[in-house]
Amino acid sequence: MPAGDGSAPGPRLPIDVDLAGLAEIAAELALGAGRLVRDDRPVDVARSTKSSATDVVTEMDTRSEAWLRARLQQLRPEDGLLGEEGSSVESRSGITWVVDPIDGTTNYLYRLPTYAVSVAAVVGAPPDPGWAPVVGAVFAPELGWLWTARLGAGALRRRVELSGAVGREEVVSTGGCTELGPALLATGFGYRDQVRSAQATLLARVLPAVRDIRRLGSAAIDLCLVADGRVDGYYESGLNPWDLAAGWLIAAEAGALVTDGRSGAPSMTLTVAANPVLHPLLASLVAH
Ligand code: IPD
Ligand code: CA
């Protein structure tokens, strides 16, 4: 739990790390890549597939990640990089950037507005256990929302107009729902048939217990919506570090517990996010 809830030590930072500077870079990168994917989208987006026939990568995922990689090379050449589209650079500074160049690629392909660029700086060596985000930015260019967080400094949302004008910062915090019955949850599904089948079985147990479910198609946005109190909780299995790194910190800094459904960090096995009262109820519903 990066924000620190009094029960776990926070991530160990390199001695000379300037978190405010890293946070500015995270926001700059998310804004730049978000504008690129929104404004440079060709009429026919070239695409190929990855882990399954429905797991798509578009030319703009690749271009966005290349832009992020080049900008980081200029700004932070000693840092590592882990990106969804294959970037893997070992860190020489103790800081690694974890980027999702388009989270919500299926939405992007279908021209649905719920996609984002997710950028986090983390300590540790993801995907190895023990890594944790220290700054994060999620920019959803068609929704016009930029969420940011820095370890220990809370979570913020800013409006970003099509013109590029960035509005004033607003502090965000999780909603106050304390029971499952009235809770509006977000979740998501993986790309592999077997995983989806297990997720459908779990969903059948969750749906009758809660107000409703939203499947928006971007884990990064789902976590920011928990931070923003626009959904009460979120759970998903199978997330990769790039799906959750920035949203994890943003939700935690907004007051959510973000765990693996037990007391550990969110992982490939499970991510559960909700305010500290709702969290144990949601975790016992979805954790095996
Ligand atoms: C996916 C989205 C989706 C989630 C999947 C992710 P992608 O990322 O975050 O909401 O349910 O688990 O893989 O493929 O759009 O970058
Ligand atoms: Ca993703």
Image (cartoon, grey):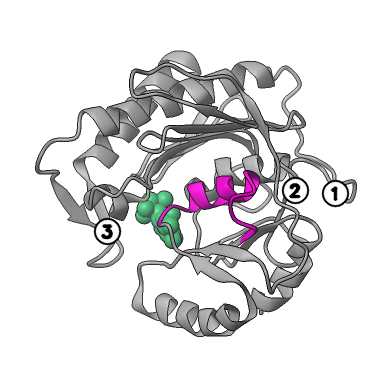
Residue 78 x %, y % = 53, 21
SS for dot 2? loop
Q: In the image shown, does 12 or 170 lie closer to the viewer? A: 170
Q: Is residue 262 magenta?
A: no
User: Which residue bears the numbered disc 2?
Assistant: 1
Q: Earlier in the sequence, mark 2 or mark 3?
A: 2
- Circles 1 and 2 in contact, beta carbons < 8 Å: yes
SS for dot 1? loop
Residue beneath the point at 42% across and 16% down: 165
| Amino acid, disc 2 | Met
| Amino acid, disc 3 | Lys
User: Which residue bears the numbered disc 3?
Assistant: 50
Q: How many marks?
A: 3
Residue 278 x %, y % = 76, 63
Residue 4 x %, y % = 82, 42
> Which of the 4 image quadrants contains residue 20?
top right
Left or right of 278 in this view: 286 = left
Q: In the image shown, does 38 or 209 lie closer to the viewer? A: 209
| Amino acid, disc 1 | Ala
- Circles 2 and 3 in contact, beta carbons < 8 Å: no
Q: Residues within 10 Å of mark 2 (few under 14, many from 20)?
A: many
Give the distance between the C-alpha atoms of the residues marked 2 and 3, in whole angstroms. Answer: 31 Å
Residue 257 x %, y % = 74, 53
User: Which residue bears the numbered disc 1?
Assistant: 8
Residue beneath the point at 56% across and 18% down: 24
The magenta segment is 217-233
The image shows residue 100, relative to residue 162, as above or below, that is: below
Q: Residues within 10 Å of mark 3 (few under 14, many from 20)?
A: few
Residue 132 visible from this viewpoint: no
